[in-house]
Image (tube, rainbow, N blue to C red):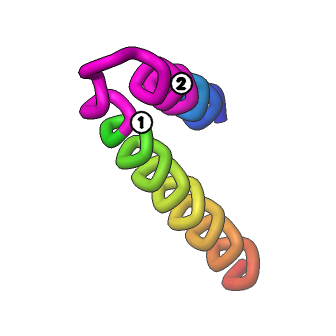
């Protein structure tokens, strides 16, 4: 869970820097991609743990 929160914070910081700094639009894109990957990671982890609870 700490990894998830750290990646969310990094994605937000990269997005803010990319949106405000002139010529650093690629940081905004990197922040968005990181956020999407992080959300997919937590969704897969949550789904896997929910499936594991039902099987037992």
Q: Nearer the viewer, mark 2 or mark 1?
A: 2
Q: Is residue 15 magenta?
A: yes
Image quadrant in which the C terminus is located: bottom right
Residue tagged 2: 16
Expressed as whole percent of the image width and height from the top left, the position of residue 44 reads 51, 66
Q: Residue at x 46, y 29 (%)?
A: 19
Classify residue 4 by image quadrant.
top right
The residue drawn where x is 57% and y is 29% is: 12
The residue lying at 65 percent from left, 36 percent from top is 1
**Horizontal placement of 38 versus 25: left or right?**
right
Say few, some or many: other residues with alpha carbon within 10 Å of mark 2 (under 14 / 14 to 19 / 20 or more).
some
Residue 31, disc = 1
Q: Position of residue 47 (x, y in %)?
A: 61, 72
- Crowding at dot 1, Cα within 10 Å, few <14 / some 14-19 / many 20+, comes out as many
Location of residue 50 (image quadrant)? bottom right
Image vertical order of residue 3 relative to residue 50, above or below = above
The stretch of residues the image draws in magenta is: 10-28
Residue 37 drawn at (x, y percent)? 41, 52
Q: Residue reaching furthest bottom?
A: 55
Q: Is residue 39 left or right of residue 23?
A: right
Q: Main secondary structure of the magenta part?
A: helix
Circle 1 SS class:
helix
Residue 23 counted in the magenta span: yes
Image vertical order of residue 42 relative to residue 48, above or below: above
SS type, badge 2: helix
């Amino acid at each position: 869970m700490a990894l998830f929160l750290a990646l969310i914070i990094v994605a937000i910081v990269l997005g803010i820097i990319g949106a405000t700094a002139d010529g650093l639009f690629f940081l905004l894109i990197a922040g968005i991609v990181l956020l999407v990957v992080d959300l997919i990671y937590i969704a897969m982890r949550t789904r896997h743990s929910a499936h594991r609870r039902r099987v037992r």
